[in-house]
Image (spheres, rainbow, N blue to C red):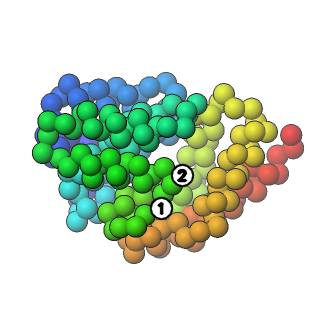
C-alpha cells in the first residue's frame, strides 16, 4: 500500500511546526514541479523495504530549498535537514548524504541508488506525464530566455541519455521509456527555430 503524506509525517514523528513549514515551502510560487505533488509521487513509489525514517525524511527534504536561480539548492536543503531533524531520532547525516546525492544522481551504495531512482522516476513515466513534467520545469526557469534554456536543458538531457539512468532492479523496466522521453524532448528543444 502506498505511503500517504499523513502516514509519512506520522512515521517521522516531528513537531507540526516543522512539517507545516515544509508544506508551506513546497507551495512557494517559483515551484511548478518541485512541489508537494512531487513528494507525494515519491512516497507513492517508495518500496516498502525502503520506507525507513531516513528515506522518508530525504523525500520530504531533498528539494525543500528550491530557488532555480541558484546552484546550491541541495546544500541548502541538506543544511535545513540538519536543523529540522536535530532533535529527532532520525540519522541526520544519512538524510544529508541522500539529499546531496541528488546533485549528480551518481551513487556508490544501495540506499543512494534507490533514492536516485525514485527521484528520477519521472524520466521513465508515460509520455504524457513526462511532457507535463518538462513543461513544469520550463515554468520554473521562466527567467531564462528560450535560446539559452533550450541549449542548457538539451545538454542536461543528453548527459542523462548517455548513461544508464536506473541503478536498481525495481526501476530498470522504465529505462527504455526514459531514454525515449529524453530523446523526444531533446529533439523538440533542438528543432525550435530561434
- Tell me which residue sits at (17%, 43%) in the image: 12
The quadrant of the rendering that contains the C terminus is: top right
Residue 20 visible in image: yes
Height in image: 164 above or below 14?
below
Is 104 placed left or right of 20 in the picture? right
Q: CA distance from mark 2 to mark 1?
A: 24 Å
Asked if residue 73 is positioned above or below residue 131 in the image, the reply reads above
Which residue does the numbered mark 2 point to in the structure image? 129
Earlier-in-chain disc, 2 versus 1: 1
Q: Is residue 151 above or below residue 127?
A: above
Packing grade of label 2 (10 A; few <14, some 14-19, many >=20) is some
At 55% across and 46% down in the image, what residue appears?
133
* Circles 2 and 1 in contact, beta carbons < 8 Å: no
Residue 152 x %, y %: 70, 45
Residue 84 screen position, x and y as percent: 24, 33
- Label 1: which residue? 106
Q: Is residue 36 left or right of residue 83?
A: right
- Label 1: which secondary element: loop
Task: Give how far across and how far down residue 39 sits, in percent.
Answer: 36, 44
User: From the viewer's perspective, is 119 left or right of 12?
Assistant: right
Mark 2 element type: helix
Figure quadrant of the N terminus: bottom left
Amino acid at each position: 500500500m502506498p505511503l500517504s503524506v499523513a502516514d509519512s509525517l506520522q512515521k517521522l514523528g516531528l513537531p507540526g511546526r516543522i512539517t507545516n513549514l515544509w508544506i508551506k515551502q513546497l507551495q512557494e510560487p517559483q515551484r511548478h514541479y518541485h512541489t508537494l505533488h512531487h513528494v507525494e509521487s515519491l512516497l507513492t513509489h517508495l518500496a516498502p523495504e525502503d520506507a525507513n525514517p531516513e528515506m522518508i525524511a530525504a523525500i520530504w527534504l531533498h528539494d525543500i530549498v528550491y530557488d532555480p536561480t541558484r546552484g546550491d539548492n541541495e546544500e541548502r536543503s541538506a543544511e535545513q535537514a540538519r536543523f529540522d531533524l536535530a532533535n529527532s531520532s532520525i540519522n541526520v547525516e544519512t538524510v544529508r548524504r541522500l539529499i546531496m546525492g541528488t546533485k549528480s544522481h551518481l551513487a556508490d551504495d544501495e540506499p543512494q541508488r534507490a533514492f536516485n531512482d525514485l527521484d528520477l522516476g519521472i524520466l521513465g513515466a508515460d509520455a504524457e506525464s513526462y511532457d507535463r513534467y518538462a513543461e513544469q520545469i520550463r515554468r520554473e526557469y521562466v527567467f531564462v530566455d528560450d535560446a539559452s534554456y533550450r541549449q542548457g536543458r538539451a545538454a542536461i538531457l543528453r548527459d542523462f541519455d548517455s548513461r544508464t539512468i536506473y541503478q536498481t532492479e525495481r526501476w530498470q523496466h522504465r529505462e527504455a521509456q526514459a531514454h525515449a522521453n529524453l530523446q523526444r524532448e531533446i529533439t523538440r528543444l533542438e528543432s525550435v527555430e530561434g
